[in-house]
Image (spheres, helix red, strand yellow):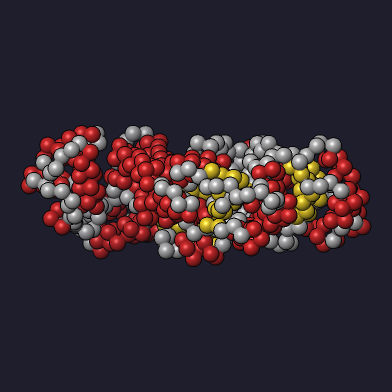
């Protein structure tokens, strides 16, 4: 019955535990079989996780009863191990649940009694995080590694990708492509998609590379350096064009290889991507909220890429570690560490991002607050299809991040406006004071054109809702209140004149950038004729230096020694302008 319907409401955000992290690291090894020594409730939840994400993994469980937990369950574990051996696995990995850790079952004794050669036992720390569990599993895998063979030339291990690492497959594929471009091979991926033989030969690589150092892998890299004398690299995140180039340059330098030709080709591709799409004219007006509670590495890398290269304003970033929070606060307006649902919802409203990156919880929270532009970028996703074609890391990852952001925002604008960029202020449902209508129109003139319709619609809806709740008309005071609360910080100072004048005078629309950059102050690398320089006056101030650089690159590519008006015009036509 309609009267019995209830809204779906989340009560809390699930924080993955250490035993989940250990399971995700173990189940990614394709020819091993994982036994979860746990009660049925725990194992059922993990089976559901496998099914939802469409993993090709087999997970076995001892399905311990209350009596088993109280009295010990070594016999039950032994029985399941024998059953799994009949499946002819290359290795068996036993993960213990917290309840087993309390009763202290002799799991090692069972393994010794059965005598299966490659048996790995992982005891995740009680109360630990997913990172703790992943690190515990990775460290235990060192026990089956082999060190007799010689080091493979120009080879690396990629440490960190596990099941339930968002986009791991695409990231690995892109980094393998980049490494192949400079003559470096990937020996082992630890652990998603790897075989036991690949895990065993991991010590043969010349260098360990931590892909997700803010999430897991650094501890095992340190231990492998101690045991096997293997150096590791964890200080550069290959997210964004510049960082991907530096990441590749450092690895090439380690192996005394040249990366110049490949990096030059990739960076030229990035320049062509920027030229052909003119995405900077869009991204420099955008703001984003990055909610990466389960991937701190993405939070750090993407926020720095957006701020340093794409010009996107990071108004909010949510992470789960203090280390990541300390790093991202340099480039984010507001940083949250493991926030509650209420804290996230309030932060979304307060920062008013144009797009939100996050997981299923974030999607629901943002929808409840009226936000439409959303990009899945973290777990849980609930049936999200992921392939090797859409990385976040590497050169192609940088392009994909920009593509996703720009397309999502533009599509949102089109759907909300149905092609119309202007429309009436009031619907007639709530009376508006004349001064309030004038104030909102003045505010709208100060908002960049391509986001104007979406922003004004939001302000209009909230203003009428506020007036309804107060039983009044929409007043200038209400417009000032909602403008202050629901617009990005970068615009708030521009709105003050509207409310100081209280609607009596109309301020001039604010420029897209407060600081005018004179053409004569630009850095020129080639001679420019006067008529060519005059054409730069038509370029918005923030983009003039980029226009100079782009035009000069075009001229060099076509063999010109100086810039004339006709060359500027030819370059503009190539860009489709």
Task: Give left or right: position of 226 versus 568.
Answer: right
Question: Which quadrant, please, contains the C terminus?
Answer: top left
Q: Where is residue 178 in the image (x, y as percent from the top left)?
A: 46, 43
Task: Give left or right: position of 540 versus 369.
Answer: left
- The residue positioned 68% from the left and 52% from the top of the image is 147
Q: Where is residue 337 in the image (x, y as percent from the top left)?
A: 54, 62
- The residue positioned 49% from the left and 59% from the top of the image is 235
Does 493 sit above or below residue 399?
below
Q: Position of residue 92 (x, y in %)?
A: 78, 45
> How many numbered marks does the figure carry?
0
Asked whether residue 453 is in view, the answer is no
Asked whether residue 85 is in view, the answer is yes
Question: Which quadrant, please, contains the N terminus?
Answer: top right
- The residue positioned 52% from the left and 47% from the top of the image is 154
Does 63 sit above or below residue 482?
above
Q: Nearer the viewer, residue 256 or 415?
A: 256
Q: Nearer the viewer, residue 572 or 428?
A: 572
Please identify the quarter of the rendering in which residue 231 is found: bottom right
Q: Nearer the viewer, residue 64 or 240?
A: 240
Task: Give left or right: position of 503 versus 87.
Answer: left
């Amino acid at each position: 019955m309609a009267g019995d319907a209830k809204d779906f409401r989340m009560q809390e955000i699930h924080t993955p535990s250490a035993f989940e992290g250990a399971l995700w690291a173990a189940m990614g090894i394709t020819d091993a079989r994982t036994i979860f020594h746990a009660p049925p409730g725990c194992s059922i939840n993990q089976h559901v996780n496998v099914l939802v994400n469409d993993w090709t993994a087999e997970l076995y469980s001892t399905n311990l009863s209350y009596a088993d937990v109280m009295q010990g369950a070594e016999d039950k574990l032994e029985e399941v191990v024998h059953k799994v051996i009949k499946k002819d696995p290359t290795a068996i990995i036993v993960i213990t649940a917290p309840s087993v850790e309390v009763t202290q079952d002799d799991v090692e004794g069972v393994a010794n009694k059965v005598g299966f050669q490659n048996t790995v036992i992982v005891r995740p720390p009680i109360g630990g995080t997913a990172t703790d569990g992943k690190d515990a599993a990775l460290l235990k895998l060192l026990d089956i590694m082999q060190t007799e063979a010689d080091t493979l030339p120009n080879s690396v291990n990629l440490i960190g990708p596990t099941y339930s690492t968002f986009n791991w497959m695409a990231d690995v594929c892109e980094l393998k492509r980049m490494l192949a471009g400079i003559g470096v091979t990937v020996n082992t991926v630890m652990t998603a998609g790897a075989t036991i033989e690949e895990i065993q030969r991991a010590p043969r690589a010349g260098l360990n590379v931590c892909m997700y150092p803010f999430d897991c892998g650094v501890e095992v890299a340190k231990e492998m350096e101690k045991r096997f004398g293997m150096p590791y690299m964890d200080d550069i995140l290959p997210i964004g064009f510049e960082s991907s180039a530096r990441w590749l340059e450092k690895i090439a330098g380690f192996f005394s290889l040249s990366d110049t030709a490949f990096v030059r080709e990739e960076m030229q591709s990035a320049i062509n991507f920027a030229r052909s799409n003119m995405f900077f004219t869009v991204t420099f007006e955008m703001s984003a909220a990055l909610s990466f509670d389960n991937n701190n590495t993405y939070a750090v890398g993407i926020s720095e890429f957006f701020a340093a290269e794409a010009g996107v304003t990071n108004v909010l970033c949510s992470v789960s570690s203090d280390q990541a929070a300390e790093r991202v606060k340099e480039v984010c307006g507001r940083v949250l560490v493991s926030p509650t649902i209420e804290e996230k919802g309030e932060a979304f409203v307060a920062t008013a991002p144009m797009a939100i990156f996050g997981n299923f919880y974030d999607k629901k929270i943002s929808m409840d607050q009226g936000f439409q532009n959303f990009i899945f970028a973290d777990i849980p996703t609930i049936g999200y299809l992921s392939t090797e074609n859409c990385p976040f890391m590497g050169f192609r990852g940088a392009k994909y991040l920009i593509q996703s952001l720009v397309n999502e925002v533009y599509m949102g604008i089109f759907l909300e406006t149905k092609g119309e960029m202007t429309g009436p202020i009031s619907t007639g449902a709530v009376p508006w004071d004349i001064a309030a209508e004038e104030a909102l129109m003045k505010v709208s003139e100060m908002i960049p054109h391509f986001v104007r319709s979406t922003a004004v619609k939001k302000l209009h809806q909230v203003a009428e809702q506020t007036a309804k709740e107060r039983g009044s008309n929409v007043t200038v005071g209400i417009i000032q209140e909602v403008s202050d609360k629901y617009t990005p910080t970068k615009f708030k100072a521009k709105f003050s004149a509207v409310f100081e004048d209280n609607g009596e005078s109309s301020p001039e629309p604010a420029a897209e950038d407060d600081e005018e950059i004179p053409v004569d102050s630009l850095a020129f690398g080639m001679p420019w004729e006067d008529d060519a320089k005059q054409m730069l006056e038509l370029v918005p101030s923030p983009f003039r230096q980029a226009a100079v650089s782009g035009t000069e690159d075009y001229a060099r590519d076509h063999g010109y020694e100086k810039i004339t008006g006709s060359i500027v015009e030819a370059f503009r036509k190539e860009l489709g302008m």
